[in-house]
Amino acid sequence: MGEKIAGLDVLGEEYFADPHAYHAAFREGAAATRVVLPRGSRAWLVTRYEEARSVLADPRFSKHHEGFRRVVELSRPDGVEGPAFDESLARTMLNMDPPDHTRLRKLVTKAFTARRVELLRPRVREITRSLLDEAAARGDVDLVDALAFPLPITVICEMLDVPMDRRDDFRQWSNVLVGGSFEPVDIQAAGQAMAGYLLQLVEHKRADPGDDFFSELVHAGDDGDRLDQGELIAMAFLLLVAGHETTVNLIANGVYHLLRHPDQLAKLRDDPSLLPGAVEEFLRYESPINQATVRYTTEDVELGDVVIPKDSLVLVSLLSGNRDEAKFPDADRFDITRPTGGHLAFGHGIHFCLGAPLARLEGEIAVGMLLERFDVTPTEDPESLPWRPGTLIRGLVELPVNLTPRGAR
Ligand code: HEM
């Protein structure tokens, strides 16, 4: 299957088009597979559920900011060149081990608890309603562009009080940094532009604080638990990129699979109380993050039937773990009523996604309101729609649909 270099599997364009077929073969093989990433670097890819979960919770699989930079550089398609990634953006808690990780995470946890996030519900509904009003006026839309992308980004920009007028720039920078384009891009320029803008924003919040969550962070207490300038910029970057690159795929991948499975769509329309479970199945079945979960071994580690040497780059495929038959019987069947407990879409262990309650809320509101208001029909063959390139993210480039108001026929 696919291209190989001396027994190593190459994760190239064929892989992006159908990663599930590769994963099924890898899971049959060994506990970890040696792969070649698009720009020639080597990594160990963990694809089985049990091993994926154990790696995510094992401190011998470490994170450090070097890891993020390398993966950003390596995961994009061949030919997409760019010099070193801007260091200042890589100093996020996602790329740190305890105790730094613990300190940084503690500072932001309270803004993302299920209770705090629930307070955002009316505003998330309002944003969704206005996006759907605009989409309805057009009828034929790309659902990624019309709903799945703008909803989460508007919400996170409002939480951080990032001005609306820079959102297109953010989209572009973020896309460049996380991959998702087959075109040559300048990673360094995007990183510098983003870091420069965030620095301005921090300075602005210092001089003129608002009642937003970002101002709160800038002015966090002087008890030693304060973020330094670099940490603030990295934190803002992490939250904005997480807000840009993930929930968009939860929404679009979910709607895509509902359209491909009319029986499941009908079931959900008949009983909207199935929605929270359906969102979990969207997350399990086509996980928005494939391999952005990067680790480094701090020593030789035995994992199932393989030994991964010290200082290896290890990628955990959440997309694959969630399709493992050993955990989810009939895993390739999309079933919005199946038990999904323990799925790995939000990771596992100390780095478990901070934004999970927010992502779930946005996913439920977006899909719920879309189905309540419209009949949704694909305007292109769903089987032929392009997926984003790169190994980090699993998401559609576009999802062209027709929206007809319900009851209008
Ligand atoms: C971490 C997935 C939405 C903020 C993670 C991780 C995963 C993940 C898998 C762990 C990565 C690892 O262990 O290496 C997702 C998915 C989302 C989503 C699938 C949407 C469906 C969000 C949102 C936010 C967010 C909306 C906030 C705005 C974060 C942060 C971390 C994180 C801050 C780092 C936590 C830490 O290092 O302790 N996310 N995420 N995520 N996520 Fe999310």
Image: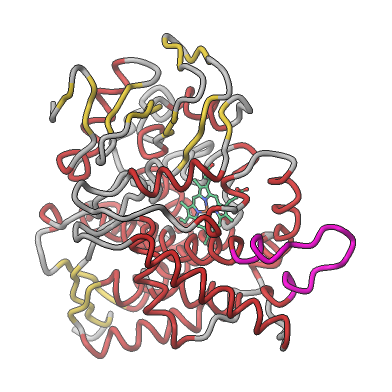
- Quadrant in which residue 378 is drawn: bottom left
Image coordinates for residue 313, horizontal then vertical, percent:
44, 30
Question: Residue at position x 51%, y 46% from top?
Answer: 346
Q: Is residue 227 magenta?
A: yes
Locate the N terminus and report the quarter of the image it occupies. Answer: top left
> From the viewer's perspective, is 176 left or right of 79?
right
Q: Identify whether 165 is placed above or below 6.
A: below
Locate the C terminus and report the quarter of the image it occupies. Answer: bottom left
Image coordinates for residue 126, horizontal then vertical, percent:
50, 84
> From the viewer's perspective, is 98 left or right of 352?
right
- Quadrant in which residue 214 is drawn: bottom right
Whether residue 358 is visible: yes
Count of numbered circles in the view: 0
Task: Please name whichever residue, 358 or 154, is drawn nearer the observer in this view of the structure.
Answer: 154
Question: Residue at position x 50%, y 78% from top?
Answer: 125
Q: Is residue 106 magenta?
A: no
> From the viewer's perspective, is 307 left or right of 204?
left
Q: Identify whether 51 is placed above or below 218.
A: above
Image coordinates for residue 246, horizontal then vertical, percent:
43, 58
Whether residue 270 is visible: no
Image coordinates for residue 264, horizontal then vertical, percent:
30, 52
Q: Which residues are magenta?
A: 216-233
Question: Residue at position x 50%, y 25% from top?
Answer: 311
Task: Please name whichever residue, 156 or 40, is drawn nearer the observer in this view of the structure.
Answer: 40
Seen as rendered, the residue at the extreme top is 305
Q: Identify whether 36 is placed above or below 274.
A: above
Seen as rendered, the residue at the extreme right is 223
